[in-house]
Image (spheres, rainbow, N blue to C red):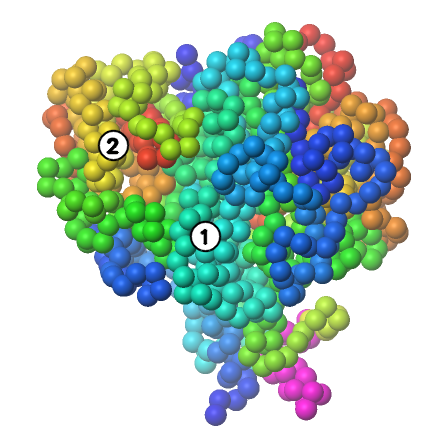
Amino acid sequence: MATLEQQIKEGLVETLGLKIAPEAIGDGTPLFGDGLGLDSVDLLEIAAMLSTRFDVEITARDSDRYKEIFASIHTLADFVRERQAASA
Amino acid sequence: MSARPRVVVTGMGIVSAAGWSLDETWDAIAQGHSGLRALSLFESQRCGKLPVGEVTGDPAARSGLSGGSRSDHLAVWAARQAWGDAGLGAASFAPDRGAVVLGALTGGMLFTEEFLARLHRENRVDASHLADRACCNSTDRIAEIFGLAGFRTTVSNACASGGAALGLACDLIEAGEADVVLAGGVDSLNRIVLNGFNSLMLVSPDGCRPFDAERKGMSVGEGAGILVLESERHALSRGAHVRAWLAGRGNTCDAHHVSAPQPEGRGLCEAMQIALADAGLAPAAVDYINAHGTGTADNDPVEAKAIRALFGGTPPAVSSTKRFFGHTLAAAGAIEAIVTVLALERQAIPPNLGLRTVDPKIALAPVMEYRQAKLEVVMSTSLGFGGNNSVVLFRRPGSWGEAT
Amino acid sequence: MKPAAHAADIVAAGAVWPGPLPVTRPAPAAVAQELWSAYRLDAATVQSLSPPERIKRMGRGQEMAIGAVKRAIDNCAEPPARGGQTAVSVGTAWAEEGDEIVFLENLIKLGEKAAKPAYFVNSVKNALASQLALTFGFQGENQTFAHDALSFESALWQGAHLLRASRARHAVVCGVEALVEFQEIHGHLLGRYGTDKTPLAPLSAEKRAAGQGTLPGEGAAAFVLAAPGTMTAPLARLVSVRARGPLQRSPVLAASSELAFIEQALRDASTRLDEIGLVLLGANGAPDLDAIYAEVAHGLAAQTPGLAVGVYRHLTGDFATASALGFELAVRTVAAQAVPREVRVVAGTPDSIHHVLLYHVTNAGHHSAIIVSV
C-alpha cells in the first residue's frame, strides 16, 4: 500500500494537473517558490484535496501555520498524520 | 488638430441590493443602510449563511423584457432608467451613431448550472435556456430595445469591467465612432461565483468591512449600472442636462499574479496617474475617491499603498461603498461610478459603511460618516483578477469652460 | 470619413491552427449516442503548446493564446517591450469555459466542500489576457472582449485605437477559442452542428449532406500592431474594422442589407470595391448561411466582374473568433500579394492583391467587414 507521502503526491499531481509524475516530487522539495512554484490559489486547492481524500480540514484558524504545513510533501504528511491521530 | 471632445454623463440607471433607482440607492447611502442580506436566490450548504448583495424583488417581473437571464433583466432595467434620465428618444441620434458597451462576466451562468445539475442528477437534457447563457446577450438586448445600431461590445475584465466599459465609451466618442453610448456593467448572483470566491477564502461571514482591522473578506453582490455618455457638444445641442464630465480615465495591468494584486499597488497607482494626466489635473485637485475596497485581506492594503504613493501624506477623502450593495463584479465599476457622480451632484461623501477601526497597517482614514463636502473632482477605482486596474475621474458641471 | 481613426500597421502575425481535418469523439452518453465531429487541435500542436519547463496546468485557451502570441513575437523585427508600453486585447466568446465546467461539475458531483478554486480563477473571462500579460510582462491596457462573433473585431478596433491615441507603442491583439465538450453539447442541442466528419465545404458545389449544419472548431491567431509608420517593414496595414449587431433577437438576414453594410464599410475606409483583390468570407458550410454569403458574393461580383472570392472555414471549423484566423490569412495575402494556397477560391481569378476585404455574418446577425491593405 502506498505511503501517505506517495498518496499526497498523487493527490497533488491530479488536483493541480501537474505535468510531472508523482514520483518526481521529492519528499522534501519546497512546494512554493523555487521548488514546484505553487502559489496561494494552489494552496487552497491542496487544502480541498486533503479534505476530500484524507478527511482532514485546514481552516483559517491554521493560517499562521500555513507556511509550515505547506512547506513540502513531508510537512503535509506530518500534518495529515497529526490530524488523523487527533480525531482517532 | 481639433480639441478632444469632452465626454459628459447625461443619464444614469442603477439596480443593486441597495435599491432599484438612483434615489433609493442614495437614500440607503445617506442613511447608512446596508443592502446585504442572507442568500435566498438558491440553496447553498456552504454559502447559504454568507451575507450577499442580492437584489430584492424579481428582476424578470420588472424589466419589461420577455425571456433571458437574470443579468439581462437587471441590465435592461438599468438601461431603461438611464435612457429616461437622459431624456433620450429615437430622434436624439442617428441609429448608427448610438452605441452600447457593457461589462459582464456571469451572463446566464444560472442556466449553465441548472442544465448540468439536471444532466448529472436527473439524467435529463433540457436545452431550453442554452441560448440565454452568453454574457453578451445583455448588451444585445439593450441595443435592440433602444435601436442602437452603432458599435457594440461586451468587455469582460473581471471586477474591473465596468470601469473599462466607461473608458471604451470615451474612446468611441473621441474617435468620432459614436455620438451617444450606453455604457456600464452587469452581473448576477449564481453558485459558481459565490462558491468560487468562497473557495478562495475571500468571502466574509459577517459582511464586508472595507479597510477594517477585523475585516474578513468581501461580500458577493449583483446589479447593473448604466451611464449615458456623449460629447458635451452633442448633449447641449439636444438640450440634455449634463450630470458630470468624465474627464479622465486610466487602465493598467499588474502582470503580477492571476488573482492577487501587485502588493505595492504600483499598477493601480499608475492607473490613477494616467487618469489624472488624461484630465490634465494634479493629484491635489482630487476631492474624493470611491475606492474598490472589497474588504479582503489583500485588496485594501494595496489600494491604501497606491493612494499614499500618489497623494503622499494628504490624500483626498476616501471611502468604499461596498457594504451597501456588495461587490457587484463586472457591474462594480459602473455602479460605483454612478455613486461617485451622485456624490458630486449632491456635494456629499458616502460613508465607508462597516468600518469600525481602521487596520493599523493601512495608512488611510476613510470617511466613516455621511457628510456634505465641496466636491469638484472625484475618482472611482476598480481592481480585478488578473491585475486589471481601472480608474475613472469625474468633474462637476460648471467647473470648466467652453463646450467641446 | 474615418479611415485614419482605425488605421494601424500589422507588424507580425502568429497562429495556432486546428485540423487539418475534422476528428470525431463520442458524444457524452447522457446527451447522445453518436460521434461528434469537430476541427480540433492535433496532438502534436497540443504538445508544442505546453512547454516542458512549465509543470503547472494552464487552460487550453491560455495555451493557444500564448502559442499564437509567441509565434507572432518570434516574427517581429522589433518585438513588443515588457512594461506599460505594450497593450493586450483579446477577443474570445467563451474564454476558459472548460475550467468553469470542471468547477461546476465538481460542485454538483462532490459538493461545495470540494470546490476547485484554481479552476474558478481560470474561468474568469480575462484569464487569457492576464496570462498573456504575466507570460510576456505586458503591463499596458489589458482588455478582453466577449461578444460572440464581434469579440475579435472589438479587440482589433480597440487595439488600433489605443495606438492612434498614443496610449501604447505596441498592441498585441489576439482572437482565440478553445473547444470544450460543453460547447459541443450547446451547439448540437441547438441544432447547429452535424455529425458527419466530412470537412466543411463552404460555398461549394459538393456540399455536405443535407441537415448536416456546420462543425465547431478551435484555434488562435495573434497580431502585433503598431501606429502607422512607427515600425519598419510591417506585413500589412489594417485599414478599417466595421462590426455591428442586429436590432432584433432572431433577425431575418437579407443579402441586400449585408451588401449595404459592406458598401458602408468601404466608404468609411475610402476604398473602392474594384480596389479589392480578394473578398475572404467566413462562410461556414451550413446551407442557410452559405446562401446569404453566396448572394452577397454574387452581389459584389455583379459590381466588379471577376472579383476573387475565397473561403477559409474548411480550415478552422466554425466558431466566434475564427475570424482571427481568417484575418491571419488576409494579412498573409497582402504581405505576399497572392492568395495562400490553403484558401479556397470559389469565384474569380485573383491577380496581384493589394487589398483584402474580410467579411463575416452569423445567424444571430452579428456582422463585420475588415479591410487590410499593403
Q: Residues within 10 Å of mark 1 (few under 14, many from 20)?
A: many
Coordinates of residue B238 in the picture (x, y in percent): 61, 9
| Residue at numbered disc 2 | C281
Query: What kind of secondary structure does the magenta stretch mostly adopt?
Result: helix
Earlier along the polypeptide chain: callout 2 or callout 1?
A: 1
**In the depicted view, which residue is nearer to us: B71 or B383?**
B71
Q: Say if C174 sits above or below B213 in the image.
A: above
Q: Which residues are magenta?
A: A67-88
Indicate left or right for B262 with C63 as reference: right
The amino acid pointed to by label 2 is: Leu
Write the residue at 62% across / 60% down. B43
Write the residue at 88% across / 28% down. B372
Tell me how far mark 2 sits from mark 1, CA to CA.
Answer: 27 Å
Tell me where residue C206 sits by quadrant. Answer: top left
- Return the chain for callout 1: C
Q: Say if B355 sits above or below C357 in the image.
A: below
**In the depicted view, which residue is nearer to us: C272 or B165?**
B165
Indicate left or right for C29 with B258 as reference: left
Most extreme residue toward the front, as rendered? B61
Coordinates of residue B287 in the picture (x, y in percent): 81, 29
Numbered disc 2: secondary structure: strand
**In the depicted view, which residue is nearer to us: B255 or C147?**
C147
Numbered disc 1: secondary structure: loop
- Quarter of the image containing the C terminus of chain C? top left
The amino acid pointed to by label 1 is: Glu
Coordinates of residue C49 in the picture (x, y in percent): 36, 56
| Residue at numbered disc 1 | C96
Q: Is residue A48 magenta?
A: no
Tell me where residue C284 sits by quadrant. Answer: top left
Coordinates of residue B353 in the picture (x, y in percent): 82, 44
